[in-house]
Image: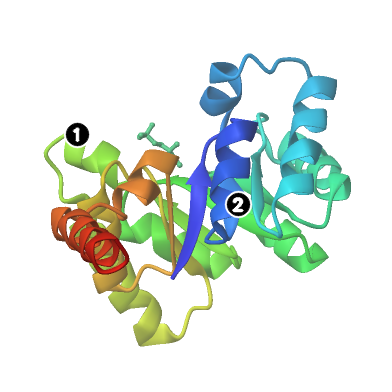
Amino acid sequence: MQFFIDTANLDEIREAQDMGILDGVTTNPSLMAKEGIKGEANVNKHYQQICDIVDDNVSAEVIATDYEGMLREGRALAKLDDKIVVKVPMTRDGVKAISTFTAEGIRTNCTLVFSAGQAILAAKAGADYVSPFIGRLDDIAHDGMGLIGQIREIYDNFGFQTEILAASVRHTMHLIECAELGADVATCPLKVITGLLNHPLTDIGLAKFLEDHKKNNA
Ligand code: G3P
């Protein structure tokens, strides 16, 4: 299973990369706004800085909602760095743009996916990644995790190569359940990843080992 970090914050990306467990980064316009990054030149510079930190897989989202605009923006983003994956929303024009990008060899991540039907369309268009938003489904009393299992089953039935990138992952149990259900990737804030470190028995056990070592070497 791959871990992506869902942020545009360079310090957090560096911290995750330094842990040696990071496989990629996902961003979106809201995350860029959170960091105060505005204007095309600054946004592109920021993507470049992210690419310089990580080994691969930097999802950069198009803003255009029409097919031609998506193509123009996506091609420009893909030219920034080989690590860029163009993030395209699940709309009619988005599906068409993903098909074209696939034919051109540009990697894509189909975002804002909330149903199995949408995930089928993304796979048919040849998306490299599909991003079901599990937390946002949970927010409206729908079964986010159930959608991950449903997409896994459908993709396995037909051998679709599109990777399931679980997004809107809010806490450690989301992450663990994604792993159980066979999501290929989970993208989440750094605190969800570091939350996996915690277990009181680890802390108690380490304290005891150190205490015994100290006594033994007094
Ligand atoms: O990757 C999508 C993600 O940024 C959405 O997360 O927590 O805003 O639903 P959230």
Q: Quadrant of residue 209?
A: bottom left
Q: Say which residue appears at 84% left-offset and 50% top-offset.
A: 81
- Location of residue 138 in the rendering, given as x and y in whole percent from the top left corner: 18, 41
Image quarter for ligand 1 equals top left
Residue at mark 2: C-beta within 8 A of ligand 1: no
* Whether residue 38 is situated above or below residue 12 in the rendered picture: above
Judging depth in this view, the residue of 174 and 156 nearest the camera is 174
Callout 1 secondary element: helix
**Could you tell me if the residues under marks 1 and 2 are in contact, i.e. CB atoms within 8 Å?**
no
Q: Pointer 2: what residue?
A: 18
Q: In the figure, is residue 8 to the left or right of 182?
A: right
Q: Which mark is residue 139?
A: 1
Between disc 1 and disc 2, the foreground one is 2
Residue at mark 1: C-beta within 8 A of ligand 1: yes
Q: Quadrant of residue 120?
A: bottom left
- Location of residue 40 in the rendering, given as x and y in whole percent from the top left corner: 80, 22
Say what amino acid the circle numbered 1 marks.
Answer: Asp
